[in-house]
Every structure is written in structure tokens, then in C-alpha cells.
Amino acid sequence: MKDYYTYLEELQHSEQTIKTNLYNINKLKQWCRSKRTKPENLTYKQVLNYINHLKTTNQPQTINRHIWAIKHYCTYLIEQGYRTDNIADDLKVRGERKKVFHNLLTSDELEDLFYSYETDKIWKGNFYYKATAKRNKMVVGLLVYQGVLSNNFKSLEVEHVDLRKGTIYIPSTRRNAWRKLALKPWQIIELKEYIEEIRPILQDHIGTNDEKLFPLNTPQFNTILHPILKKLKTYNQKVTNNTHIRASVIVNWLGQYNIRKVQQMAGHRHINSTESYKQDNLESLHEAIDKFHPIH
């Protein structure tokens, strides 16, 4: 039988996250022993009682971390055949500070960033600078259309782009799940040129021969990303950083697709992460939690 530590490791959680999770589950087991039960036999009502017990000495943010641990542990127990349901799946304690985004970009504003990014009139006499400009435009496209995270870029490889199917595969990270996203038709055309003509120029210039989609001679992709974001801000003053662009993309997705699809597109491991972007529905979300999960 797979132990819980191995289960968490396979989810690519950090050592600190695993340590915190195990600590919280040990607390749950201690409480269960005092109630003469086991985590695999816990009822929904008992979980609510446990959360109320936690509320006597913990803040909402800490309690939600305990709930997060219980969700993972229940999923593990289901996988091992000890439970058939996840009793903590929809639980969340009110009072934790929620994300509130300001001056988000509309889908048209996001698209304008891509089309505004100049490549043809930049340093006509210098083939390398023109190549970097075209590379940067590919990065902008992945920011504004696919909501790619800054730490995704350095792990992207040429094989992750399927020009025939018009998709790009985004590998998983410690925090986010893998995802496969559709490319816009104009992205496909420009990525083809980039991969076949521009990328070899960049590789030759910096002396690399790996399979990275965006060749680098430094471990930090921010050396590329920071100048790009600075330039995007000249096109639209609302742009602040990569997180702001990604939030705009996700909020726009929520206006087009159901939340489960957006969860997959964004690479969120948990639905709560996606729900935090539902800015126009926070009040009704609170009401729903009050109605069905009255934890006060």
C-alpha cells in the first residue's frame, strides 16, 4: 500500500507543504482518537465538529489549511479503498482574505497587446535583435491567450507545440497541474516561423543546442519576461505584471466556460483556486457557503 507521504510526493508538493500536511493530519488523527473513531470512518457532521474545535484556537486561514489537508487525505483514502467519498471536498471557512483584482484587462485589451507588439521595425540591420523581438511576441501570445505562468516558460520544449493539432502542452509544476490548450490560428502561423527560422538563430547566438522552446543561457526566464512586461505597459498602462495578465485571462475564461473547464485550462489543482477569480459572484458564493456549510 502506498503511504501518504509518497502520495503527496507524487503530487509534486514541496517538502515544506508535505510536512505541514502531515502535521495537520496527525492533529486530525489525535482528535479522532479522542472521539473513538478513525479518519476513514469520519462523517460529514464529525468533520464540521472538528472544524469548530479548530476555530477555538486558529484563524480562518489556518483552518482552511487543515481543511485542505483533510481533502487530500480523503482523496488518498479513496485511492487506497478506505473511503468512497470526500467529505471535505466543498468545505471552506469564511473570513479568509480573498483575492480582489483591479483594472483587469478585457479580452480585446489582451489581444491588442499581442497585435501591438512590434517586430518588423526593430533594429532592421541586426538579425539577432529582430529574432529576439519575434521570440518576445511568441511569449506575449502565450501570456495573453493561454495565461501561461512565468515559471512555465523555461520548461516548455519544441515537442510541446503541436502545430498540426493547434495545441500546446504546458507541463505541471509544484503548484499547478499540466494542461493542453488550443492555440489561436495566428499563433500557429507565427510559431511555425519561430520554431523553423527564428529559434535556430537564437540557439546559434547563445551557443545552446537543447530542445527548449525558448533558448536561454541563464536559469532565470525573468531576464526575458521583465523587458516584455515593461514594453506592454507602454501599450496599456493597466498592465502591471504577469500575475495581473494571467488573472485577466482567467476571469475572461470564466465569462465563457464553466468553472470546471476553466480549472483545467488554468492548471488549478483545486476548484477553490478557480473560484477565487469569480469576482462578480463572491457575494453569492458566500451565501451558498452559509446555506450549505454554516461554519461560523
Image (cartoon, grey):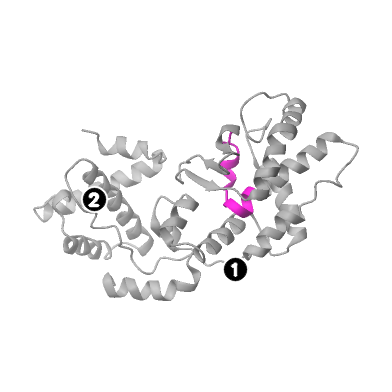
Q: Residue furthest left?
A: 36
Given residues 117 and 51, the one toward you in this image is 117
Q: Measured from the top left, where is residue 295 in percent x and y?
A: 27, 70
Q: Residue at x 50, y 39 (%)?
A: 171
Q: Amino acid at mark 2?
A: Lys
Q: Is residue 114 left or right of residue 87?
A: right
Q: Which mark is residue 102?
A: 1
Residue 42 shows in the view? yes
Q: Is residue 199 above or below residue 275?
A: above
Q: Residue at x 27, y 47 (%)?
A: 75
Disc 1 secondary structure class:
loop
Which residue is under mark 2? 27
Q: Measured from the top left, where is residue 234 in percent x and y?
A: 77, 59
Q: Is residue 225 above or below residue 194?
A: below
Q: Residue at x 88, y 42 (%)?
A: 123
Q: Residue furthest right?
A: 125
Q: Measured from the top left, where is residue 25 in percent x and y?
A: 25, 48
Q: Measured from the top left, where is residue 102 in percent x and y?
A: 59, 68
In the rendered image, which quarter is residue 77 located in? Answer: top left
Q: Which residues are magenta?
A: 142-157
Q: In the rendered image, which quarter contains the C terminus?
A: bottom left
Is residue 154 within the magenta segment?
yes
Is residue 129 within the magenta segment?
no
